[in-house]
Image (cartoon, rainbow, N blue to C red):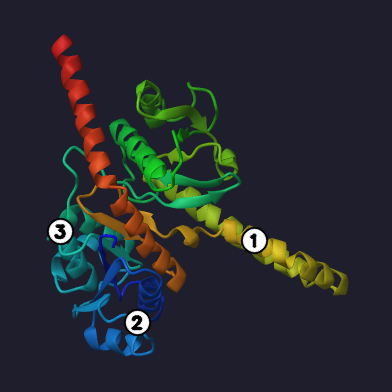
Amino acid sequence: MSEITRVALDAMGGDNAPVETVKGAVQAVQQRKDIQILLTGREDVIRNELAKYTWPSDQIRIVNATEVIETAEPPVKAIRGKKDSSIVVAMKMVKNGEADAFVSAGSTGAVLVGGQVLVGRIKGVERPPLAPLFPTLKGMSLLIDCGANVDARPSHLVQFARMGSIYMESVMGKKNPTVGIVNIGAEEEKGNALVKETFPLLKACKDINFIGSVEARDIPYGMADVVVCEAFVGNVILKLYEGVGGALLRKMKQGMMSDLRSKIGGLLVKPALKNVMKDFDASEYGGAPMLGLNGLVVKTHGSSDAKEVCNSIFQCVTFKEQQINEKIRAAIREDKDEVKEKESKE
């Protein structure tokens, strides 16, 4: 039997909690036997939701947490002040080795702060990035960072590239994934100070497949498997990507319902369109992992439904099975050894 992966799930986090979070947990344990879900939140509320379903009693456990961190609360103050919140209780379980991973659709700020303060960084990791997968014409790419480090330095982006490559190769099965840095042109001399300084550092990295600059218009075509940038740029890319996708879909639906001929044509293309939409549905791949921490922290969309919650739980299993943290630790150690060797020669 496979080793059990214990996932602490913030049952109270997100726009659709606890209805969709609890439903997603139930769907996960109904499909897999190698998962145990630790639902953190108000016990009476969670128990009422669980009563709607039939589920293996040994695979879901409720961990009572009396407080909830709201989206608008200052993250640092909330993490420090609400010690019995569903987020803090769950993250402490990861820190103490009672859970292998944490999943939340709640406050992004609180999750990012809690990840660094409570779970803690892997020794040598300068800044843990938030790294969501997003659909492209070639499959999926990883955007790193999309929200954790707005004022990043070149050394941070280099680590993002290395951690992103490890994730894409180990979790997504992409051999020798290509890495590109977001820029305003293909030429090496273009870009702001951060990009110009980071470019030669990435170029010199022997353990990544760096292909140079990637312009925003090339990202949806899958030009790079790992798209590297600081969080301000990454967050704008991600939200514009989601917004344009939603607007195009709405426009297509309006066009198909405009007259009788369009309606008939819409019915004919509906099966093919469904398959295309499934390929471009980011929720199929779970949430955004915060890489470089001592335990796995996954942030899902605030509007996550049960499917995204369920897939985020499955994502945690793969992360553990592929020993991502161990591989990141090894890569950081190798980097330190190379620096020491270079310094000794000089």
Whichever of labels 3 and 1 marks the residue nearer the N terminus, that label is 3
Q: Position of residue 342 (x, y in %)?
A: 20, 15
Q: Position of residue 139 (x, y in %)?
A: 55, 47
135 relative to 15 in the view: left or right? right
Q: Nearer the viewer, mark 3 or mark 1?
A: 1
Q: Quadrant of the N terminus?
A: bottom left
166 relative to 239 in the view: left or right? left
Which residue position is annotated with label 1?
A: 275
Does residue 305 appear anywhere in the picture?
Answer: no
Q: CA distance from mark 3 to mark 1?
A: 40 Å
Residue drawn at the location 45% of the way across and 36% of the way down: 177
Q: CA distance from mark 2 to mark 3?
A: 27 Å
Relative to 336, residue 298 above or below: below
Q: CA distance from mark 1 to mark 2?
A: 30 Å
Q: Nearer the viewer, residue 59 or 301?
A: 59
Which residue position is annotated with label 2?
A: 55
Q: Residue type at mark 3: give it.
A: Lys
- Image mark for residue 95: 3
Whichever of labels 2 and 3 marks the residue nearer the N terminus, that label is 2
Whichever of labels 1 and 2 marks the residue nearer the N terminus, that label is 2
